[in-house]
Image: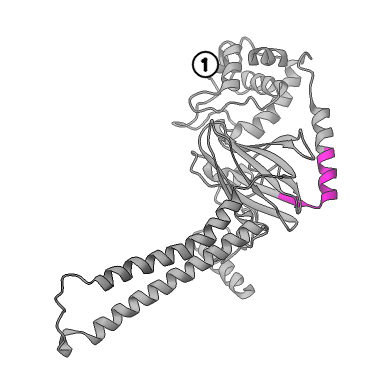
Amino acid sequence: MKNAKRLQSFVVGTTLLAAGLPSWAVVDSPGGPAVLQLGLQPPVTQIAREIYSLHSLMLYICLAIFLAVFAVMLYSIVKHRKSKGHKSASFHESTTVEIAWTVIPFLIVIGMALPATKTVVAMKDTSNADLTIKATGMQWKWGYDYIKGEGEGVSFLSSLSTPRVQIVDPLRIKNDNYLLEVDNAVVIPVNKKVRLIVTANDVIHSWAMPAFGVKQDAIPGFVRDTWFKAEKTGIYRGQCSELCGKEHAFMPIVVKVVTGEEYTRWAGAKIKEQSAMADDPNKVWTVDELKQRGAQVYAANCVGCHQATGKGVPGAFPALDGSAVVAGPKIDQIRLVLNGGKVMPSWKMLSDTDIAAAITYTRNNWSNKAHENIVQPAEVLAARK
């Protein structure tokens, strides 16, 4: 395997050098895909192991059918060819053949369906969960809310953390976890049943984690659920598996499985962090304070569509630099950010202060010099009602 990986790296590096591009070693992504991987990712849940077993069983059954059918065909072609004096049989029907090709496939299907049904039923049993997490898909990131169990009240957004310059510049060396890394990973305790409630804000997404044997579509207006119970600590990587728009490839999912003690510490620290960051919506901020905070909010949530320059993506996402909405009445922009628009998702999950800061940042940045150049958190709070 090591020699195969070296060969893979050599081939990739040689190809890139021939194209005038920099080369780098191709390595496994911890918790994600591996170099020269042919099968499924190593399973770390009971359901994933059953899926892997079913996958192998179906593959062997299909292979056996393929070999049997083509063996009979080849035998018939060789042994009963015209050059040996054989003539084709002339008969209209055969009851025996009719029964055989009906009964045999039926038995094969039953033999495949019984073990598969057992696993499918187990996949939908979300009862008696130790922890319940809500995952909300949006263009293009995931929002997580811990709604039951230890860590209840924890909430955060999880966005791609691969630097944008690596994506747009082919000359840049890529990270080992290129496009499979996030700023905030989902953290769960090992050997605990986790119920995952899945929905979406805008279009259909899909929460998929191969090592867990989980793939659940996230549909706007619907709430669906699934579950997993990771049996091994580590970091595991997945992606949105439903084509959801221009940035579909940039919606990774990262789950960090830790010990019970580590999870307790993480949950406690996260709750304290969120409490400390909770702002009084009635606090009056200065323009400079809001612009400074707004730059961070914009970089974390808006830059993917509207770009760091505010120029947007022609034909896909409108520019904020010189935008009539940004230069117009601030209440219109507040409502657009809260409720979403034709191509813009709702950002209600952000705090009043973060929304006010992001809007203030856009109204005072680039070439924008809006007349109403500051939005206070209290104005956002009032617009929510």
Tag 1: residue type? Ala
Q: Is residue 169 left or right of residue 259?
A: left
Q: Estimate the x, y position of residue 74 in percent, counting from the top left.
A: 30, 80
Q: Residue at x 51, y 38 (%)?
A: 204
Q: Estimate the x, y position of residue 121 in percent, counting from the top left.
A: 57, 52
Segment colored magenta:
256-269
Q: Is residue 378 left or right of residue 48?
A: right
Q: Estimate the x, y position of residue 293 in percent, counting from the top left.
A: 73, 26
Q: Quadrant of the N terminus?
A: bottom right
Q: Residue at x 43, y 72 (%)?
A: 63
- Tell me if residue 350 comes above or below residue 14 in the rendering: above
Q: Is residue 64 left or right of residue 5?
A: left
Asked which quadrant contains residue 372, the reply is: top right
Where is mark 1, residue-wise? 324
Q: Residue at x 80, y 37 (%)?
A: 270
Q: Estimate the x, y position of residue 284 in percent, counting from the top left.
A: 77, 13
